[in-house]
Image: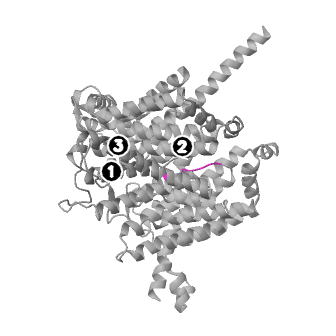
């Protein structure tokens, strides 16, 4: 755990240094750029709350990917599951008329169901037809994307709009603000706590992790590996779906074209740098959210294109992941040397 | 008859980038690398092709730049996955993300546009009329007059089948994937072979990228590879890397891709016709699993 934190911090710092080098080569002032980045993401009240709101889909899709990867299934379908969850919440928000206290939970439920169904489809293909979920979930992403585009272009199209989008959902389904903070943040924090409890304190989390590390051992140990596979797919799909639902209910309050496109691979990226840990996913989710939020400020202050952040994110992933492996090798070597000395002495 | 010609042409246009990337992927597949970075290599290739073609005023240099860009991606892959022993899957994912980020950043930084860049100054790769066949009535129209890269792709397929199954390099390549320790003990480093396989893969993906941005269109748009690298990966896995199989599968995808264009303006909404290549991938995955179960 301490080794993880150390390699993480070192990796992020190294990535920032590489980023500064790239900026300097382009003729920008890296210190001014990073200062602008921090100022607009963490050190201003509006930026700080916006960073937390932006972190909601990042952390939730990250949790989805982390739990899936740690438990075995290579679920790369977060983008599609997010879209289906958002679609579920939109449908309920448009056509069900109830007071807020009932409608909000119902919308959340619909988003969980939407994501779980889409992931469940991939699980069904795997269990019944022996099709690998790795490519299936990827292809389902594209299919979900076009399906949602069709839904908002034809059946649910808002005639008063110029680009494909639905009408706004019923006001009763809007998440209330809480002192400038979007309430969707609360749902995210709750999801993180529940996931952490399940994965590191619960029995099912233990079984899942064991299956992820050695499925044969888990099977011999008495785990129902196949049933667990389906469960993990459903749970991770629901998490991604929740991300989509919260984005609709807390953000634009309608399904607009391109929703979730920016978050497509971010969840997987976060899970990868966090090495599938829950707390790591939460922290890296916040970091990436701060980067994305501060990017706009950086562009305002120093004219560095905000797209620079996408490069920086990928560099962070590469450096942290590679750094973890090399650092582990260094630690192993030191430990061996120490043991050798002890046995000689 | 015209419909047939149109469909064949659309099929070849759709098949070419997937075929090239998949042939590249098959080299790494045989070398025992789980390489999912084709998508990123293709995207960087497409961007560098436009970059080279626009600034150097030549499509040949555009293609060379595309290959160069893809080679840089392969270099990063080598450093991380082969030298530093980072997980190949994670490296691939990170590289794909890096490609999307880098190309959108450079699009903004160099061309000062968002979304897509197109300009009359970009030189496209020309179409080629085959000297003898062009004169023959039906066959000429069927086989001649396509983009240069399409012929290159066909050539690359034949060549790769020869290299993989008939040459010493091919034997070592398959050895690196089949039993790396055995290859090492014969005095040939498996990691060197893997590096070569990645270089070949990058060249193929660079060509595929150049075809995307300089072939039938002359533009670069954000994320224009649009999952073709993933489809090519599916193609490689489906036929266990056999180049002839890859050729057939790519043509099949090209056919469905072409069908998409033909069904446009019909009664089916475009959003559903656009799904066809992805649904086709799922169907072929299903057929693959059925075949595998019969063999077992």
Alpha-carbon span between mark 1 and mark 2: 27 Å
Alpha-carbon span between mark 3 and mark 1: 17 Å
Are the residues tagged 3 and 1 within 8 Å (C-beta)? Answer: no
Return the disc, 1 or 2, that comes first in the chain's sequence. 2
- Taking the spot 44% from the left edge, 65% from the top edge, the residue there is B275
Between B131 and B23, the one lying in front of the other is B23
Above or below, comparing residue B76 to residue B197 in the picture: above
Please rate how many residues cluster around mark 2, counting C-alpha atoms within 10 Å: few if below 14, some from 14 to 19, many from 20.
some
Return the disc, 2 or 3, that comes first in the chain's sequence. 3
Count how many numbered circles sit on residues in the image.
3
Q: Check disc 3 and report the residue beneath it.
A: A108
Q: Nearer the viewer, mark 1 or mark 2?
A: 2
Between A302 and A137, the one lying in front of the other is A137
- Taking the spot 49% from the left edge, 66% from the top edge, the residue there is B277
Q: Chain of mark 1?
A: A
Q: Which type of secondary structure does the marked residue at label 1 adopt? A: loop
B109 sits left or right of A342 in the view: left
Are the residues tagged 1 and 2 within 8 Å (C-beta)? Answer: no
Q: Check disc 1 and report the residue beneath it.
A: A259
Q: Which residues are magenta?
A: B33-40
Q: Chain of mark 3?
A: A
Alpha-carbon span between mark 2 and mark 3: 19 Å
Q: Chain of mark 2?
A: A
Looking at the image, which residue sits at the far bottom? B137
Q: Position of residue B233 (x, y in %)?
A: 57, 57
Please rate how many residues cluster around mark 1, counting C-alpha atoms within 10 Å: few if below 14, some from 14 to 19, many from 20.
many
Above or below, comparing residue A340 to residue A71 in the picture: above
Q: Which type of secondary structure does the marked residue at label 3 adopt? A: helix
Q: Check disc 2 and report the residue beneath it.
A: A231
Above or below, comparing residue A139 to residue A286 in the picture: below
* In the image, residue B187 lies in the stretch drawn in magenta: no
Q: Position of residue B14 (x, y in %)?
A: 49, 69
């Amino acid at each position: 755990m301490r080794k993880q934190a150390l390699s993480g911090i070192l990796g992020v710092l190294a990535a920032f240094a590489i980023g500064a080098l790239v900026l300097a080569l382009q003729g920008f002032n890296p210190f001014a750029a990073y200062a602008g980045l921090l100022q607009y993401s963490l050190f201003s009240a509006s930026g700080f709350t916006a960073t937390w709101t932006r972190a909601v889909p990042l952390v939730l899709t990250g949790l989805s990917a982390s739990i899936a990867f740690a438990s075995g299934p290579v679920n790369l379908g977060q983008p599609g599951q997010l879209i289906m969850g958002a679609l579920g919440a939109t449908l309920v928000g448009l056509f069900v008329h109830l007071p807020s206290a009932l409608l909000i939970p119902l919308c959340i439920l619909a988003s969980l169901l939407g994501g779980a169904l889409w992931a469940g489809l991939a699980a069904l293909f795997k269990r019944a037809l022996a099709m690998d979920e790795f490519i299936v979930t990827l292809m389902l992403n594209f299919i979900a994307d076009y399906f949602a585009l069709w839904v908002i272009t034809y059946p649910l199209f808002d005639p008063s709009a110029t680009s494909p989008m639905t009408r706004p959902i019923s006001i009763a389904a809007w998440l209330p603000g809480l002192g400038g903070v979007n309430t969707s943040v609360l749902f995210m924090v709750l999801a993180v706590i529940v996931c952490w409890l399940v994965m590191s304190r619960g029995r099912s989390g233990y079984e899942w992790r064991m299956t992820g590390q050695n499925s044969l051992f888990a099977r011999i140990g008495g785990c129902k590996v196949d049933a667990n596979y389906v469960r993990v797919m459903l749970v991770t799909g629901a998490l991604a779906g929740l991300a989509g639902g919260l984005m609709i209910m807390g953000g634009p309050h309608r399904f607009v074209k391109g929703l979730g496109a920016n978050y497509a691979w971010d969840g997987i990226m976060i899970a990868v740098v966090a090495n599938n840990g829950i707390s790591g996913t939460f922290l890296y989710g916040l970091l990436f959210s701060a980067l994305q939020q501060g990017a706009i400020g950086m562009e305002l202050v120093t004219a560095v294109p905000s797209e620079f952040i996408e490069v920086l994110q990928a560099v962070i992933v590469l450096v942290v992941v590679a750094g973890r492996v090399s650092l582990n090798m260094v630690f192993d070597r030191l430990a061996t040397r120490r043991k050798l000395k002890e046995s000689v002495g | 008859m015209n419909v047939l010609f149109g469909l064949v042409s659309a099929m070849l246009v759709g098949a070419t980038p997937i075929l090239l990337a998949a042939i590249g992927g098959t080299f790494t597949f045989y070398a025992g690398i789980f390489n999912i970075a084709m998508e990123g290599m293709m995207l960087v290739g497409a961007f560098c092709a436009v970059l080279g073609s626009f600034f150097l005023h030549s499509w040949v240099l555009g293609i060379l730049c595309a290959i160069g860009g893809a080679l840089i991606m392969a270099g990063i892959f080598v450093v991380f996955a082969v030298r530093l022993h980072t997980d190949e899957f994670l490296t691939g994912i990170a590289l794909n993300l890096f490609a999307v980020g880098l190309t959108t950043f450079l699009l903004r930084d160099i061309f000062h546009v968002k979304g897509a860049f197109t300009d009359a100054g970009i030189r496209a790769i020309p179409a080629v009329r085959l000297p003898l066949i062009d004169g023959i009535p039906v066959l000429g129209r069927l086989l001649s007059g396509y983009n240069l890269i399409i012929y290159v792709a066909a050539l690359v397929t034949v060549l790769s089948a020869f290299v993989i199954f008939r040459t010493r390099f091919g034997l070592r390549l398959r050895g690196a994937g089949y039993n790396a320790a055995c290859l090492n003990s014969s005095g040939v480093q498996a990691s060197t072979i893997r590096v070569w396989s990645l270089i070949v893969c990058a060249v193929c993906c660079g060509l595929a990228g150049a075809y995307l941005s300089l072939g039938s269109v002359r533009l670069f748009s954000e994320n224009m590879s649009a999952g073709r690298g993933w489809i090519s990966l599916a193609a490689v896995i489906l036929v266990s890397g056999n180049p002839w199989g890859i050729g057939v599968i790519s043509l099949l995808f090209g056919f469905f891709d072409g069908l998409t264009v033909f069904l446009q303006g019909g009664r089916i909404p475009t959003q559903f016709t656009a799904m066809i290549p992805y649904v086709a991938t799922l169907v072929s995955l299903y057929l693959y699993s059925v075949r595998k179960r019969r063999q077992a």
